[in-house]
Image (cartoon, grey):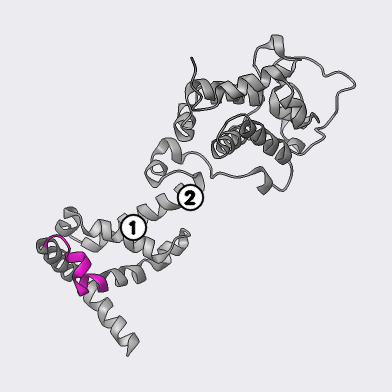
């Protein structure tokens, strides 16, 4: 009996003209028709069943696909289309792809649909990588801000893991007035871009001009610039061999503890003053 009922419902709604007639009737019924009409509820159950496989393909719940179908069905273009179901199916497909990309990029569906955001790869944490970044990325093997040879007594490899250095960097900003969520998002974004760059200097320059990142993180220009200098180091070659030139991340990677950074008065002052929301007189 149940399978017969489902088959009848599917046959009733799959006809494009029957769907058009129902959509026109719901539209003419005015406000509240979709909420109160039993046939509208049956249509949405049918949409959830129809697009369940598509939703699962993109890691979504079938009712998320049904919600996208609902939005498409309310549009006048769907009612006037030669094949209303074709319009609805395409709308659901686009929404599912946008939802999947938005979840991967940690942005809204509206932003994920824009080419300037969709070109990025999905967000990932350093802990997701099988091998530590410091094992293979040249940015951590030498100071890229100037052509020079490292002193003989300098460590050949970082003495702490990248993941630990990233967490300590986040903790450093959080202890100095940065909202923890903002600090984590900003530092992880910077380190992710660093992983893709040829050197710290190229990562610094790319991030300095990255207005989209500032918009996503909702950071003022002064805070963003200060964070880059603190995390990656000052790009001026004159500071290449100084703590200011190395940056917090590299200092942590070569074994300097977090407590030592918190005793650096100049560094602490710069990070504290750059915290978003700090009023400057």
Mark linked to residue 92? 1
In the image, residue 98 sits, relative to residue 118, either above or below, namely below
The one nearer the camera, 246 or 11, is: 246
Residue, x 23% and y 73% (percent of image)? 13
The one nearer the camera, 179 or 8, is: 179
Q: Are marks 2 and 1 in contact (CB under 8 Å)?
A: no
Residue 96 shows up from this direction: yes
In the image, residue 200 sits, relative to residue 22, either above or below, namely above
- Asked if residue 215 lies left or right of residue 86, the reply is right
Quarter assignment of residue 146:
top right
Distance between the alpha carbons at the discs numbered 2 and 1:
16 Å
Q: Residue furthest top?
A: 238
| Of marks 2 and 1, the one in the foreground | 2
Residue 272 rendering spot, x and y as whole percentages? 60, 24
**117 inside magenta stretch:** no
Main secondary structure type of the part rendered in magenta: helix
Range drawn in magenta: 30-42
Residue, x 19% and y 68% (percent of image)? 19
Q: Secondary structure at mark 2?
A: helix
Residue 167 rendering spot, x and y as whole percentages? 68, 39
Q: Quadrant of the N terminus?
A: bottom left
- Asked if residue 124 lies left or right of residue 38, the reply is right
- Asked if residue 78 lies left or right of residue 248, the reply is left
Mark linked to residue 103? 2
- Asked if residue 267 lies left or right of residue 91, the reply is right
The mark nearer the N terminus, 2 or 1, is 1
Quarter assignment of residue 142:
top right
Residue 141 shows up from this direction: no
Q: Secondary structure at mark 1?
A: helix
Q: Residues within 10 Å of mark 1 (few under 14, many from 20)?
A: many
């Amino acid at each position: 009996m149940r399978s017969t009922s489902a088959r009848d419902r599917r046959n009733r709604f799959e006809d494009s003209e029957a769907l058009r007639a129902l959509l026109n009737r719901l539209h003419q019924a005015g406000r509240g028709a979709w909420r109160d009409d039993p046939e509208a509820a049956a249509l949405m159950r049918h949409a959830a069943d129809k697009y369940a496989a598509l939703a699962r393909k993109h890691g979504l719940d079938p009712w998320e696909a049904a919600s996208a179908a609902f939005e498409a069905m309310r549009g006048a273009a769907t009612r006037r289309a030669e094949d209303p179901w074709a319009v609805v199916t395409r709308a659901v497909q686009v929404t599912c792809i946008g939802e999947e990309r938005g979840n991967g990029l940690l942005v809204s569906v509206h932003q994920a649909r824009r080419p300037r955001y969709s070109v990025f790869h999905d967000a990932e944490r350093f802990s997701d990588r099988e091998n530590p970044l410091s094992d293979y990325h040249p940015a951590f093997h030498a100071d890229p801000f100037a052509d020079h040879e490292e002193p003989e007594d300098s460590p050949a490899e970082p003495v702490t893991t990248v993941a630990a250095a990233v967490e300590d960097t986040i903790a450093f900003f959080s202890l100095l007035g940065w909202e923890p969520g903002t600090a984590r998002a900003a530092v992880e974004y910077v380190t992710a871009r660093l992983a893709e760059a040829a050197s710290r200097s190229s990562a610094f320059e790319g991030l300095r001009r990255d207005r989209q990142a500032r918009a996503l993180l909702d950071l003022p220009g002064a805070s963003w610039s200060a964070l880059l200098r603190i995390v990656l180091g000052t790009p001026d070659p004159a500071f290449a061999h100084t703590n200011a030139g190395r940056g917090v991340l590299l200092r942590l990677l070569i074994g300097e503890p977090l407590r030592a950074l918190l005793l650096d008065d100049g560094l602490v002052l710069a990070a504290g003053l750059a915290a978003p929301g700090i009023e400057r007189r």
